[in-house]
Image: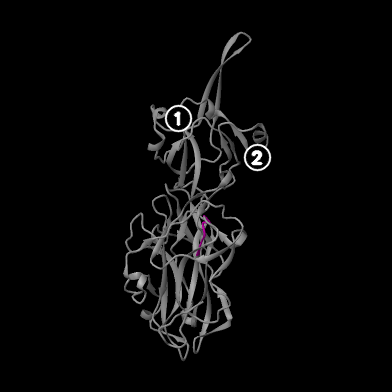
């Protein structure tokens, strides 16, 4: 099924500034021999020094020393790596208000380009005797304001009041990517009480910069609760940027009552992010959820056991490559181009005129389209254009309605 998509406003969001480009001189690196460093070997989390250029000038017959200094308006709060040589470039540096650092970066810009620079023109690198490098900045430090956090906090429907998941969507709140659920009361024979539909609030998350990597607290009942990294949330970085693409379906006597992101089962600091759903047993005829605690909010992830009916889980998980060349702005039609049991990696898209984005984007629209049924599964998929080559695409959630016929067939919603 194709969907028209527009990457603007509240329709989508991204891991803003997680990865970006930065132009540096090897003289900015720490160490006495920094000027001799090779661009390709740079891999550092140290803060850069400013570039200093000393010029001798004659004034009224006397010799004076003029020192010109350049410090980046938007420093990299993380790892500088993936560099290559790009010497003697002049550039237009934009104000540090988010987004890209440069409007242009050229050896010989025109005078009109200099005059129309909306920031400041910097030419100190053209006079530098050290190697200059064009690098990737991967945000990792506590000072970073980049979107790099994924919440692992679960969202549950109120099963004590017979509520189930009626919709889901991806959100970015408090600069954290999260799954948000809508709930509604379950009625007999797989129906929902439309009057009870409501989105379940997420916790207010508070970022703390007083530790090396940063940390989070949750605001609950007028108090702050410390959260645990890789239990309640995680940070993406250049090593941890993989997302598993899965369909997580449950047996016919169960219904979806919650969802969250989590680290994949292999764990570790480079673990992929995966979708986890929570199921609760129910009686189709009466519409009542089980009151047995062990049958409420049971966690399920996709693997060859839980999804044994899906042939895609009979093989090893495969990669889905994200294209990154076309500017993603504007209208385009997206189609499902991923398969269950694949994965993708977030990456820096390099566009025309130094536009840059972390791709793929994330679809902020609710997954359901006027559905009135509870769900037996949630999927996380990659959608892109088959006609516009190079379009980065979006990550979307999808829902699987319960099977009213009690057959093996699952209804796609």
Q: Which region of the structure is painted magenta? A: 390-395
Q: Residue 227 lies in what quarter of the image? A: bottom left
Q: Which residue lies furthest to the bottom in this view?
A: 285
Mark positioned earlier in the residue sequence (2 or 1):
2
CA separation, marks 2 and 1?
Answer: 27 Å
User: In the rendered view, how is the structure colored?
Assistant: one colour
Question: Would residue 246 be counted in the magenta stretch?
Answer: no
Badge 1: how crowded within 10 Å, few (<14), some, or many (20+)? many
Closer to the camera: disc 2 or disc 1? 1
Q: Position of residue 366 (x, y in %)?
A: 55, 70
Question: Depth check: 40 or 43 in front?
Answer: 40
Q: Position of residue 341 (x, y in %)?
A: 38, 66
Residue 303 seen in the current view: no
Report the residue at 56% width, 84% height from top: 193
Question: Would residue 391 be counted in the magenta stretch?
Answer: yes
Provide the residue designation for mark 1. Answer: 131
Q: Residue 30 lies in what quarter of the image? A: top left
Provide the residue designation for mark 2. Answer: 118
Residue 135 seen in the current view: yes
Say if 149 sits above or below 372 in the image. above
Badge 2: how crowded within 10 Å, few (<14), some, or many (20+)? some
Report the residue at 65% width, 36% height from top: 113
Q: Is mark 1 on a helix, strand or loop?
A: loop
Q: Position of residue 384 (x, y in %)?
A: 51, 62
Q: Position of residue 102 (x, y in %)?
A: 57, 40
On residue 375, the disc is none
The secondary structure that most of the magenta stretch takes on is loop
Q: Are marks 2 and 1 in contact (CB under 8 Å)?
A: no
């Amino acid at each position: 099924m194709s969907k028209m998509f527009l990457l603007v406003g509240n329709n989508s969001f991204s891991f803003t500034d997680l990865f970006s480009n930065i132009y540096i001189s090897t003289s900015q690196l720490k160490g006495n021999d920094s000027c001799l460093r090779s661009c390709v070997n740079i891999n550092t989390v140290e803060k850069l020094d400013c570039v200093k250029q000393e010029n001798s000038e004659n004034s009224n017959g006397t010799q004076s020393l003029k020192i010109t200094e350049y410090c980046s308006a938007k420093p990299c709060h993380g790892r500088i790596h993936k560099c290559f040589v790009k010497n003697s470039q002049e550039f237009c540096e934009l104000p540090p208000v988010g987004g890209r650092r440069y409007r242009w970066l050229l050896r010989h810009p025109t005078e009109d380009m200099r005059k129309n620079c909306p920031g400041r023109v910097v030419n100190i690198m053209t006079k530098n005797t050290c190697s200059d490098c064009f690098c990737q900045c991967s945000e990792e430090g506590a000072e970073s304001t980049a979107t790099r956090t994924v919440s692992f906090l679960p969202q549950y429907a109120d099963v004590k009041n017979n509520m189930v998941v009626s919709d889901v969507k991806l959100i970015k709140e408090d600069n954290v990517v999260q799954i948000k659920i809508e709930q509604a009361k379950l009625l007999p024979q797989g129906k929902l009480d439309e009057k009870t539909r409501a989105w379940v609030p997420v916790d207010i998350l508070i970022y703390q910069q007083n530790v090396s990597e940063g940390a989070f607290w949750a605001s609950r009942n007028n108090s702050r609760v410390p959260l645990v990294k890789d239990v309640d949330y995680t940070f993406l970085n250049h090593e941890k940027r993989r997302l598993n693409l899965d369909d997580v379906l449950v047996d016919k006597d169960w219904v979806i009552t919650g969802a969250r992101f989590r680290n994949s089962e292999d764990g570790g600091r480079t673990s992929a992010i995966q979708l986890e759903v929570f199921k609760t047993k129910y009686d189709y005829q009466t519409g009542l959820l089980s009151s047995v605690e062990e049958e409420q909010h049971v966690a399920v992830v996709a693997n060859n056991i839980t999804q044994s009916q899906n042939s895609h889980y009979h093989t090893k998980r495969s990669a889905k490559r994200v294209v990154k060349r076309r500017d993603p702005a504007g209208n385009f039609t997206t189609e499902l181009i991923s398969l269950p049991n694949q994965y993708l990696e977030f990456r820096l898209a390099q566009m025309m005129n130094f536009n840059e984005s972390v791709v793929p984007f994330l679809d902020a629209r609710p997954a359901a389209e006027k559905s009135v049924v509870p769900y037996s599964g949630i999927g996380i998929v990659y959608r892109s254009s088959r006609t516009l080559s190079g379009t980065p695409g979006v990550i979307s959630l999808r829902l699987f309605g319960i099977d009213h016929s009690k057959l093996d067939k699952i209804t796609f919603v």
